[in-house]
Amino acid sequence: MEKKWIGLFFLAAIFLSFAAGFAIKDIFPDRLFSQGSDIYETITTALEEHYYYNLDDTATLEAYIASMDAIVASYGSYFNDPYTRIDAYNTSTLVNNQVGLGIYIDFVDNIPVVRHVIYDGPSYKKFYPGDQILGIKDGISFVELNDIDAITEIFREQAFLDHTVTFEVKNAIGNVRDVTITYDILNDTNVTAHQFINTNVSYISIQQFNPYVDENNIGTAQAFKETLAYLETQGLNDNGTLIIDLRNNPGGSLTALHNQGNSSLPSGIIQQLLPYDASVNYFSLIDNDGNMTHYKGGLAEPKPYEIVVLVNRFSASASEVLAASLQSYGYAVYGEETFGKYVYQNQIPLTEINDTSYVLVYTEGIWTYKDQVTIQEDPIDIILTPTDKIEDIVELKYETIMEKDQVYEPLKNMIRVINLYYQLDLRTDGYFDSDIENAIKDIQNLATIQVSGIIDFETFQYIYDLYLSVQYDISYDRELEYVVGRYS
């Protein structure tokens, strides 16, 4: 599939950023749960005066946060509501053009460990899952430091454009190496676009819905608007088709779909794509008091081109709202049945401590479409795609050397990657047979690494690079290729 890249904006941060499916609400109560706060203060004061152990700021802070978590978790558990929770996010990372390494990390025993690498980012083909970042080669040892907040601050201090840093890294099998990386700008508008050469098909992928904040944080709706305008200037017209890819999109801010008449926000994506009709509500929100808010289109006339949508079982919340709204107008939706989240969330800011904001996210109501039905009552009508699913491949990890005539759980996803990348049909049940051994030998020969037929760590690194290609390079997206073929 030949392609021309015309726009690329994607989420890539050093740490996994917070994103939830809610509409922002300006509620700033002076005091929340006053009785619970009094109990917390009474207990903490008593322990400070009489407890055998000395309470420090860290202990009291963790206890305070744990008390908030316990209250909210109790309510959520009582109503079987997994969406009501306390969320925390670092306020210093909420910028659109942030400088970073392009990796996601977890802290294990207070040491940063790489969980995922962003395709084609600064760390691509340099870091791998399981890599422990032990320190910086100018003498900063994370092992000796052993403090998450301090290590995080060092990452921030290093993060300026074109700054090159050499890290000391231990891989999943215990080998230590130096990794030199140059920090770069990483965008998080979550919109990617492609124009397929020799076809009349254009493509926009939306990975998540972020709200508009300001001119430096333009959000998903504005990024979509600019990208769509570019596609339209490049030939997306009445003979064309626009594919909107919402696979693996967990949702996000509903203001990215509709600005609710707020002139300070860009037009939402539904307003950009669907015509206004006073009698038509593309979706509605219904709160706990039964109050209904209806959302309509914003165009004087329909778009002159066809629009189709691509979803999967991980498409949830706001992505389901968008898919349902487009289908209710008559546009086709391909893929598989979506997640089925028919409730929506709101949030109340609680407090900010050490550059971390804590918010109460709670279920406020349900959303409906068509004739005021939920997607549980009337699921989105999906045209199934009879192809391999990229989303069937979860994160790859290396645990041990793998060889013929043995069974390995991690082998399942590695073979799925190999099958998609090389268009093979190897077994994916975890059994390492002779066909897999021969395929691994071929791969090792192509990668110019030792040809052994076993999957050692070096071979895993090569397969992980293939995995990132399969995940992010649409040349390997068989499901998308199937849909493009139907409209070319």
Image: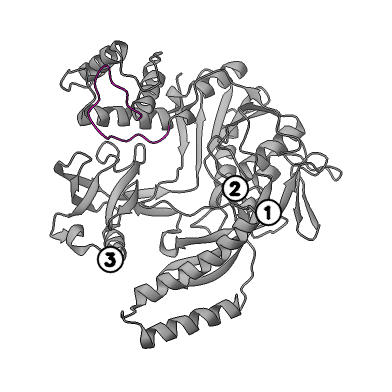
- Does residue 69 show up magenta in the picture? no
Highlighted range, magenta: 394-409
Q: Residue at position x 47%, y 24% from top?
A: 477
Amino acid type, label 2: Ala
Residue 425 in which image quadrant: top left
Among the two numbered marks 1 and 2 on one chain, the one whose residue lies closer to the N terminus: 2
Is residue 26 in view from this perspective? yes
Question: On screen, 82 above or below 379?
Answer: below
Q: What quarter of the picture does the C terminus occupy? A: top right
Mark 1–mark 2 contact, CB under 8 Å? yes
Among the two numbered marks 3 and 1 on one chain, the one whose residue lies closer to the N terminus: 3
Is residue 305 in view from this perspective? no
Q: Secondary structure at mark 1?
A: loop
Question: On screen, 90 above or below 180?
Answer: below
Amino acid type, label 3: Ala
Task: Say the numbered circle drawn on residue 204.
Answer: none
Mark 3–mark 1 contact, CB under 8 Å? no
Residue bearing mark 2: 221
Residue 359, given in percent of the width and then of the height, sits at: 54, 65
Residue bearing mark 1: 259
Q: In this image, 240 relative to 161: left or right?
A: right
